């Protein structure tokens, strides 16, 4: 039992559990809401969430990623205070700019906004963006300090409280979609208040803001923002191009394997959240060998875990596709099998980008992502134009990921002196050491 507790409390495990909880609550919320409201109301909710996701991505790129990077390697208490305080100041500025932009749009184009169903987003997101400030900053601070148990607590308070409301509303209250949005705001307020009471948000450090720290984070943030936009473009470009050049039915057909492959990314995302602050700290302390070691170990670990997972899922592709999409979409299992080949390249691609950010070379990571987007978009257009094949579109995903691995490796070899041949030996060594450490406990 003690060994089990130690495994659960390990950084990698807590990060994985946190991402699984986040994903499960997300699926459960959609499941309930889709059965609570009609298509129009549910559509407005989806637009509200989509708009929120877009603007929160922008805020994350400008504020959260730089905060994690620079706080991870802070050497003194004074440096920590100025780093967190400057991040707070920058977050407030970005939030104010976003509020002005949104309300200006609402005043200038009220009819189109109403007719297209964006009312919920334009009315309520500005308030949500303010309520999110303490929560978002706390999550970044806790990630930088690698306190993933506390992140799990915050996620549970935030999403758990909203889920409880949705269940009560479904069975007893039957309130409107506007009430659901207000409850959504309330759940974020509750989590933000919890972070403030616990002292995790760092708002008290805003008075330690310095111009130097502010400019440092802003410089890093402009590149991480473009990288995030490019990454999201990579995810959405297939669907957009298929929708433009083919049919809505093709988009639906392609979306089933696309949703399945997103589940596989959960453990990778968890490992990245652990590795990024560790590499950032080593980089800030001028320990390139330590950065290389972390890169090799986590990339090797993730790849070695993905190989048996991909083989197993390759043979389960047809029943999984049938389970998620039904008989009408079961033929898309071949696309999922192609995606599984792509998944084997994901660890090298993702960790090369994260490592470039960790060593304070975000501009190179941006170049890498833009190269991948170029390969994917051009490839999709050519494949659809000449072959009309969804499988060909999936193969383009493999090609863009391979481009990311090649470009990322070239940059890391030049700036960090990495050798990709060391990934698997270091990954195996890391797994062996972890197992031996566990058995000795």
Image (cartoon, rainbow, N blue to C red):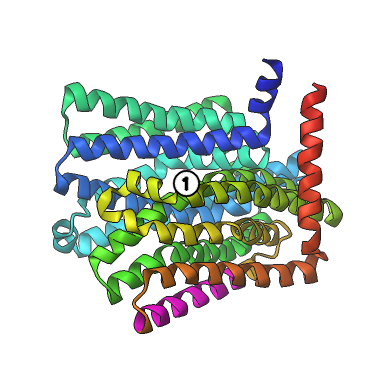
Horizontally, residue 333 falls left or right of residue 106, namely right
In the rendered view, tell whether residue 150 sits above or below residue 365: above
Residue placed farthest to the front in the image?
315
In the rendered view, tell whether residue 298 sits above or below residue 252: above
Q: Which quadrant of the figure contains the C terminus?
A: top right
Residue nearer the viewer, 196 or 379: 379
Quarter holding residue 352: bottom right
Horizontally, residue 354 falls left or right of residue 418, namely left
How packed mark 1 is, by other alpha carbons closer than 10 Å (few <14, some 14-19, many 20 or more), is few
Q: In this figure, what is the number of numbered marks? A: 1
Magenta stretch secondary structure, dominant? helix
Quarter holding residue 219: bottom right
Residue nearer the viewer, 149 or 2: 2
**Residue 401 falls within the magenta-colored stretch:** no
Horizontally, residue 411 falls left or right of residue 19, namely right
Q: Which quadrant of the figure contains the N terminus?
A: top right
What residue sits right under mark 1 in the picture?
263
């Amino acid at each position: 039992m003690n060994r089990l507790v130690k495994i659960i409390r390990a950084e990698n495990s807590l990060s994985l559990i946190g991402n699984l909880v986040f994903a499960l609550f997300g699926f459960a919320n959609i499941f309930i809401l889709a059965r609570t409201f009609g298509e129009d109301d549910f559509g407005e909710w989806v637009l509200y969430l989509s708009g929120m996701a877009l603007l929160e991505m922008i805020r994350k790129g400008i504020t959260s990623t730089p905060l994690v990077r620079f706080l991870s390697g802070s050497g003194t208490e004074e440096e920590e205070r100025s780093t967190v305080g400057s991040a707070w100041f920058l977050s407030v500025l970005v939030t104010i700019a976003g509020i002005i932009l949104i309300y200006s749009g609402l005043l200038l184009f009220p009819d189109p906004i109403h007719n297209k169903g964006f009312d919920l987003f334009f009315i309520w997101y500005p308030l949500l963006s303010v309520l999110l400030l303490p929560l978002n900053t706390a999550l970044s601070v806790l990630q930088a300090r690698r306190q993933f148990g506390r992140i799990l607590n915050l996620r549970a308070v935030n999403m758990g409280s909203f889920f409880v409301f949705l269940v009560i509303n479904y069975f007893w209250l039957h309130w409107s979609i506007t009430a659901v949005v207000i409850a959504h705001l309330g759940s974020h307020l509750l989590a933000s208040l919890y972070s403030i009471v616990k002292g995790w948000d760092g708002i008290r450090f805003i008075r330690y803001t310095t111009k130097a720290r502010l400019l440092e984070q802003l410089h890093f943030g402009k590149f991480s923002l473009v990288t995030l936009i490019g990454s999201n473009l990579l995810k959405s470009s297939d669907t957009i191009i298929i929708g433009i050049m083919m049919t809505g039915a093709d988009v639906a057909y392609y979306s089933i394997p696309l949703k399945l492959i997103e589940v596989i990314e959960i453990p990778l995302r968890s490992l990245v959240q652990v590795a990024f602050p560790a590499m950032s700290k080593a980089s800030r302390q001028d320990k390139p060998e330590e950065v290389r070691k972390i890169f090799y170990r986590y990339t090797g670990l993730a790849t070695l875990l993905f190989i048996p997972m991909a083989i197993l899922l390759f043979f389960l592709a047809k029943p999984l596709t049938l389970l998620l999409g039904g008989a009408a979409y079961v033929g898309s299992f071949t696309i999922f099998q192609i995606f599984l080949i792509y998944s084997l390249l994901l660890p090298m691609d993702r960790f090369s980008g994260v490592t470039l950010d960790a060593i304070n070379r975000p501009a190179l990571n941006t170049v890498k992502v833009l190269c991948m987007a170029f390969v994917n978009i051009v490839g999709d257009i050519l494949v659809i134009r000449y072959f009309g094949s969804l499988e060909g579109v999936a193969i383009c995903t493999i090609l863009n990921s391979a481009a990311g691995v090649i470009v990322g490796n070239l940059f890391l070899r030049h700036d960090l002196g990495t050798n990709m041949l060391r990934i698997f030996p270091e990954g195996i060594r890391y797994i062996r050491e972890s197992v031996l450490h566990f058995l000795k406990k």
